[in-house]
Amino acid sequence: MMNVLMLLCVIMCLSWQNISRKAYNQKVINGAFSFNLISILSAALFFALLSIPKFSFSKDFIIYAVLFALSYGMAMIFSFLAIAEGSLALTALIVSYSLILPSLYGILFLNESISLFLILGLCLLIISLLLININRNTATKITLKWLIFVVLAFLGNGLCSIFQKMQQVHCDGLYKNEFMLLSLTISAAIMLPAVLIKKEKFATHFKRSGGYAILCGLANGIVNLFVLILSGRMSVSVMFPIVSAGGIILSFIVSLLIYKEKLSVMQYIGALLGLASIILLNI
């Protein structure tokens, strides 16, 4: 029951991050890196507060923190660059498929079991992502530069989750807060030059819509905390597909009820397939 509650919380917080990004972008132009920096610092503060009662540092998790920070920064920066270079829908679709990487890691390196239901659930989830994203009215612009950016975003997004799991396995489930605090601090150091290079008006962006970025960062902190806990309680090959499928359903509901978006028949079918994939992954 506790696993279910944490999964639901992860799904809701992921959806809230998307809502925060959308609200921020409606008020701020050319402030993507500022948003990411504020979010990272807010998430780092979240883990700093959690670490205060019994902070414990170990050299055992330093390498994993560095690897996580590099992949996390890579995912953020190259997702932004891919969206700027080409299709938002196509970029989001391909980055969404990065859930396959931690699933394969669990199966290949952690000896997690493969069942027919897992295979069917993953297949339905992939088709669901395709149907929901492919029907959006966006111009498809595919260039070599976009392809490089989206591949790097895909790898960064998938590797983040793998390094989290590796750290927890190597450290016997310890140092969750300390690991994330160090990782996010390094990520912030990576993101700061991007803000300066882009010459974004950080102070202005923070004053105008910094609250959305802070809330996004806090939600991101909760997501990472529960993912670390859940990675020690269930198979990552099952956990990440469930989170992704649940995110599809919740985003679909938010699009309909809050943003009043008009969706196509294929997108409705995609949402139903996402729901079916959740059921199969839990059998």
Image (cartoon, helix red, strand yellow):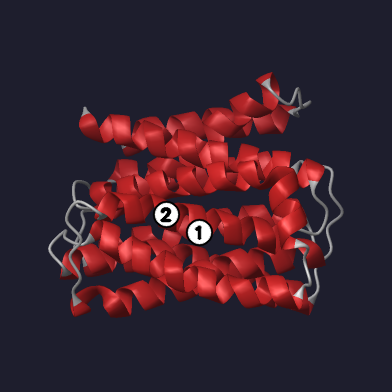
SS class of the residue under badge 1? Answer: helix
Q: Does 236 appear above or below 136? A: below
Disc 2 crowd, CA 10 A, few/some/many (<14, 14-19, 20+): some
Amino acid under disc 1: Leu
Which disc number belongs to residue 45? 2
Q: Nearer the viewer, residue 136 or 213?
A: 213
Q: Nearer the viewer, residue 110 or 35?
A: 35
Q: Nearer the viewer, residue 53 or 264?
A: 53
Mark 2 touches mark 1? (CB < 8 Å): yes
Residue 191 position in % (x across, y down): 59, 71
Residue 138 position in % (x across, y down): 84, 49
Residue at the right extreme, as displayed: 139
Quadrant of the snapshot with the N terminus: top left
28 lies left or right of 179 = right
71 lies left or right of 64 = right
Residue name at image x 45 percent, y 53 percent: 43
Q: Does 25 appear above or below 87? A: above
Amino acid under disc 2: Leu
Quadrant of the snapshot with the C terminus: top left
Residue name at image x 76 percent, y 29 percent: 264
Q: Nearer the viewer, residue 172 or 32?
A: 32
Residue 176 position in % (x across, y down): 25, 58
SS class of the residue under badge 2? Answer: helix
Residue 185 position in % (x across, y down): 44, 68
Residue corresponding to mark 1: 41
Residue at the top extreme, as displayed: 257
Tell me the quarter of the picture where residue 103 sits: bottom left
